[in-house]
Amino acid sequence: MALFDYTIDAKSGHARAGTYQTAHGEFATPMFMPVGTAATVKGITVDVLHELSAQVVLANTYHLAMRPGADVVEAAGGVHRFMNYDGPMLTDSGGFQIFSLADTVKLDDDGVEFKSIYDGAKVHWTPEENMHIQEQLGADIAMQLDQCPPYPATREFVERAVDLSSAWAKRCLASHTRLDQTLFCIVQGGMHLDLRLESIRRLRKIEDESLSLGGRRFGGYGIGGYSVGESHDVMFETLGLVARACPEDRPRYVMGVGNPTTLIRGVHEGVDMFDCVLPTRTARMGTAFSSTGRMNLRNASYTRDFNPLDEECACPVCKNYTRAYLRHLVKQGEMLGGILLSIHNLHYLLDLMRKAREAILADEFEAFYQKWMSSPAAKDY
């Protein structure tokens, strides 16, 4: 398989099982990416990531560019060597983080100016500068700089975001030169199906123009601007049609989604890749995913509960620790509590995607989907 080729191994309905080749190995879809914002998945060593069979780790361009600086990461040999992780990696452009700081952002056709959350310094990024930073970081997959509109937003605001994101995608593709790294574009358009489809049309036109000049195409299609405040039902009014309008031969990646049921519903609609801080963030708050729904380990009902966290889970936490002990750690504010629950939650999502892939390969995904949607867990997410 050639570098950055995506092979569809099987389909079951709209659900796809695929294999994607990167410079640091291949990964199988559908899949969930643990988020290592600052080149670390909070509380999780790289050895544990491998033990959990995490395939791709996401790091964030905004945070790494601010601290320790892209030049420091580059001097270390790139983000893989910097954090001692030898598997495939992806860097988000930082666009979402920038535009979440709306009060400090100045936006124009050339790029975006914002204040660093670390020291208040003014920073200006063009798409070309963002590409240079991501090439310095050296992840296998880079994401274009885009504008992510919030929800709700006026149609006029979303139209402007589509215009800017499309123009910036063209500039990112033209300036991206690193051959051992691929670039994913990002579809925007809010909850407006026509704007989403227009965004995809423009991105495909940008690819065609690039290829006609001897340039490169996008290695995959990110789908941004979902899970930004809308309900899940609103999201799924358009998500499936948007995903299936993206090229068949590239991964489709819904950004910032980590709810178990949303993952299963996304796979059902033809999505291949997901990422989110949810499993580790909720773990640090004392919350665990389980086959019966979310569990708040702060609840007094677990004080003398010496059962495994989830009797249906095969992760090392469920094999070795009781609910009572985990509750004790959470109530005491012990860092081990957040670490163990993070391990469990990550295993839960990674294993869920593994099972979804197995169902697709067996052409039994619809039955798998219906079983999940009727389960106690699905009703709690």
Image (cartoon, rainbow, N blue to C red):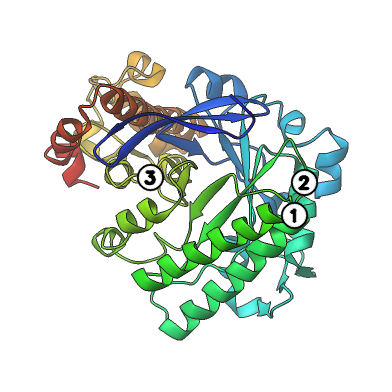
- What number is the disc on residue 271? 3
Q: Quadrant of residue 182?
A: top right
Counting labels gives 3
Amino acid identity at mark 2: Glu
Amino acid identity at mark 3: Val
Residue, far front: 212
Q: Which residue is mark 2?
A: 135
Q: Please report contact status of discs 3 and 1: CB closer than 8 Å, yes or no.
A: no
Residue 264 in percent (x, y) is at: 28, 41
Q: CA distance from mark 1 to mark 2?
A: 6 Å
Amino acid identity at mark 1: Met
| Residue at (30, 38) in percent of width and height | 15
Image side of residue 325 versus residue 161, left or right: left
Q: Is residue 42 above or below residue 87?
A: below
Q: Quadrant of residue 154?
A: bottom left
Reading the chain from its start, which is encountered first: label 3 or label 1? 1
Image side of residue 264 versus residue 137, left or right: left
- What number is the disc on residue 178? none
Q: Which residue is mark 1?
A: 131
